[in-house]
Image: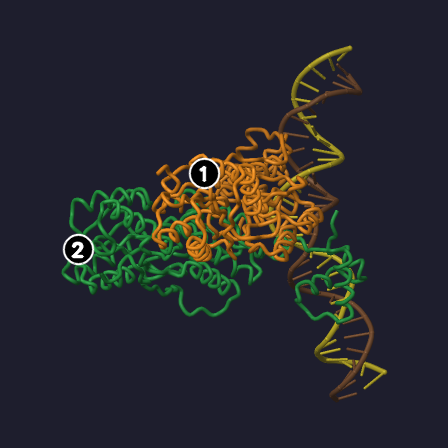
Chain colours: A orange, B green, C yellow, D brown
Amino acid sequence: MSATIYDVAREAGVSMATVSRVLNETAVVKDETKKRVLDAIAKLSYRPNAVARGLASKRTKTIGVIVPDVSAAFMAELVRGIEDVARMYHYHIILCNSDGLLAREVDLIGTMWEKQVDGIIFMSPALLTEHVNTFEEAQIPIVLCRTDDPEGRIPSVNIDNSGASIDAVRYLHKKGRNKIAFLGSIHHEGTLTSERRRGYVAEMENRKLTPIFIDTAREEYQDALLAVRTHVTMEPIDAILAANDEMAIAAIHAILDEKKSVPKDIAVVGFDNTKLSMMARPELTTIAQPMYDYGAVAMRFMTKLLLDEPISTFRVVLPHQILEHASSADV
Amino acid sequence: MSATIYDVAREAGVSMATVSRVLNETAVVKDETKKRVLDAIAKLSYRPNAVARGLASKRTKTIGVIVPDVSAAFMAELVRGIEDVARMYHYHIILCNSDGLLAREVDLIGTMWEKQVDGIIFMSPALLTEHVNTFEEAQIPIVLCRTDDPEGRIPSVNIDNSGASIDAVRYLHKKGRNKIAFLGSIHHEGTLTSERRRGYVAEMENRKLTPIFIDTAREEYQDALLAVRTHVTMEPIDAILAANDEMAIAAIHAILDEKKSVPKDIAVVGFDNTKLSMMARPELTTIAQPMYDYGAVAMRFMTKLLLDEPISTFRVVLPHQILEHASSADV
DNA sequence: ATTGCTGATGGAAGGACTTCCACGCACTGA
DNA sequence: TCAGTGCGTGGAAGTCCTTCCATCAGCAAT
C-alpha cells in the first residue's frame, strides 16, 4: 500500500529512529543524512501516519470542540476562529454539537477522551457541577468559551456580559429613554442571558428606573416577534434591550408591524454584532463581541496550556463595545 | 494512568481477545463471560483507546470535512447536517476551512490522509482537475457536497442549480416581469453561480428576453448593495434574481434606498432560503435548497460507501423549490 | 470408542510510530 | 597515550488495540 517510516529508512539507508528524528526535529541529524532522508521521503511520497504517531507519542494534535449548535447565529464564526488558530499551531479540530443537552455533553467529553484529544474547547449554555466533575475525571485540558464558570475553576474566555448590559442601559438612559425593556427568555442561572439580564436589572435599579421584562420561550426570531408585538400594544416603552441580535431584529419588525417607529418611538439595541445587525432596516445598534476572536483566543489559550507557556490569567475577559446605528440614533 | 484492555482482561479473568470481542460484538461470547467483562469494564471505568483501535483496525471512525468557510451564510447548517448523521453512525468529523484555495485544499486532503480518516466530504467553489488527481492519489472515499463534478467521476450531492434558475425566470415572467436581471459575481466555470447564471441565460433566451447582468466583485452584501444601487438608477428593470439570499437582501435594501418599491417596481428573488430570507422586510422570495439535508444526505451517502451498501446513483440531486414571499408577490 | 464439528476462548503477531538506552567514532585535554 | 566528551546513529521496547490461528471441551454421528 503506502510507504511506512520503515520503507523510508531502508531507502535512505538509515534506521527508522533517524527518520523519526528528521520528521520531528527532535534531535540533531547530520545535514547529509537529513538530505538523504528527505529525498527518500519525497521519492516514496511518504506521509507519516498520524494515528500511529498518536499512539506512540500520546499526543494526537487534535482538539475537541463541543458547541451547542454550529448553525446557531454566530457559532460558526467562533468555530472558524478556533480552526484558524488551530491550524497555525498544527492542530485539527473535531467538531461536535451538543444541543446544550447535559447527557450529550457528558457523553461527548467521554468520546473525546477515547479519541485521545489533546484538549477540549467547551461551550455550553450554562456550566453545571456535572460538567466540572466530568472534566476532572477526563483529565484533559479544558478551555471554556463563551461559557462562564462563576467559581473560576476552569480556564475560560468570555466577555463581561453583565457589564455590557450596564453600558447599554446607561447609553439608552443618556439618550433620554426611561422605559427600557429587556427582551430575552428566562433560563436557569449561569446562562449568558441571565448575566445580561442581571446587568440590566442592576443598572435600572441603580438609576431608579423600573425594569420591564418581555419574556419569550425560546430565544428566537418568531418567539420574539410575537412577544414584542403583544407587549408593545399593552405597555408603553421607549427602548428595548434584546438578549441577542436575532431577537432585536424581531423587535424592530414587530414595532414596525404595529405602526410605530424605530428609533423615534422605541429604540432597539441588540447583542452580539452578528452580520444580521447590518442587514436590518433601520440598521441595528448592537453590543459587539468579537465573535471570531472568541474562538481564536480560546484556541490560543489552549495552545498555551498545551505548550506549557506562562498564563497570566485563567479568566480571559474580551472587550465589548456598543456599535451605534440607526435603531437607537438620536431622533 | 487509565485502564487498558489488558487490565480489563485480568480483572475479568479472560484474555484481551475476549474483551475485544465483547467490545466490538465481533463474535459470540458466552453470556456469563460477557457479563464478567462488562462488570470489569464498569468497575475500571474503562474506555477503549480510539487511537490504538484506529491503528490496529485501520478504521478511525472519523470523516474529514473540508469546507470553504464554515462561517459563510449557510455552511454551518450544512455542517450540522453532516455531524448529526455522522453521530448516528458513530462517526466523528474533523472540520477544516479551505477558503476555497486550491493549495490549501490539496494540503488538507493530504493531512486528512495522514489522519487516516475513513472518508472525506468535500466542498469547493469549483472542482478542478487538480482536485480529482489528489483524490485519486489519496485513495480515500470522497463525497462532493454542493460541488458539482461535471464529468461525474466523483460521487456528489447537489441541487439542479441551472434548473432552479430556469424555474425562477419562468416564475417571474409569468408574473409579467420582462426585464429580469441576474445579480451575481463572475467566476470561472464550474461555480454554483455560473450554473445559476447558465440557467438564467438559457431561459431568458428561450423566452426571447434580453439577459441583464448586475455583476459584483464578491458575492457579499456590501458589494451587492452598491452594484444594485448604481444599476437601478441607470437601467430600468422590474425583477432581480440574485445568486444568493445575502445579495438579494442587499438588492431589496438598495431598491428601497433609491425610493423604489419592492415588489411593485422591482421584484426580488433570492437563492438558498437562509434564515435571512425571513428576516427581511418585505420577506424574501427565495429558492429553497435543503441546506441541512445537503449535509445529512452527503454524510449518509458516505456511510453507504463505507459500509458497502448498494448505491443507486453517484450523483444525488436534491429537490429545490421556490418559496414565495412578499418580495415578489402580485402587486 | 473414535471421528468430526461447533462454540467459546486464548495466544501472539502485527500495525506504524516514538523514545530511551547504548554505542562507536573523532576529538579534546592532561 | 588514555580517559573523557559529545555528536550522530542504531536497536529495541513500548503504545493499545484487532485479528488470525490454534486450542479445547463437549456432543452428535458412526
Q: Between residues A207 and B106, which one lies in front from this camera angle?
A: A207
Q: Furthest residue to the left? A: B208
User: Looking at the image, is mark 1 or mark 2 nearer the viewer?
Assistant: 1
Q: Amino acid at mark 2?
A: Lys
Which residue shows up at 58% across the image and 36% down it?
Answer: A301
Q: Chain of mark 2?
A: B
Report how far apart the C-alphas of labels 1 and 2 lie in the structure: 46 Å
Check the image and report above or below for A86 versus A113.
above
**Residue A16 as seen in the image, left or right of residue B199:** right
Residue B179: assigned label: 2
**Residue B277 as seen in the image, left or right of residue A293:** left
Q: Is residue A130 visible?
A: yes
Q: Between residues A14 and B17, which one lies in front from this camera angle?
A: B17
Residue A127 at x, y = what percent?
A: 63, 48
Mark 1: secondary structure: helix
Residue A125 at x, y = what percent?
A: 58, 50
Say which residue label 1 marks: A172
Q: Which quadrant is the C terminus of chain B positioned in?
A: bottom left
- Total numbered badges shown on the rendered structure: 2
Residue A106: assigned label: none
Mark 2: secondary structure: loop
Check the image and report above or below for B69 versus B47.
above
Q: Amino acid at mark 1?
A: Leu
Q: Is residue A40 visible?
A: no
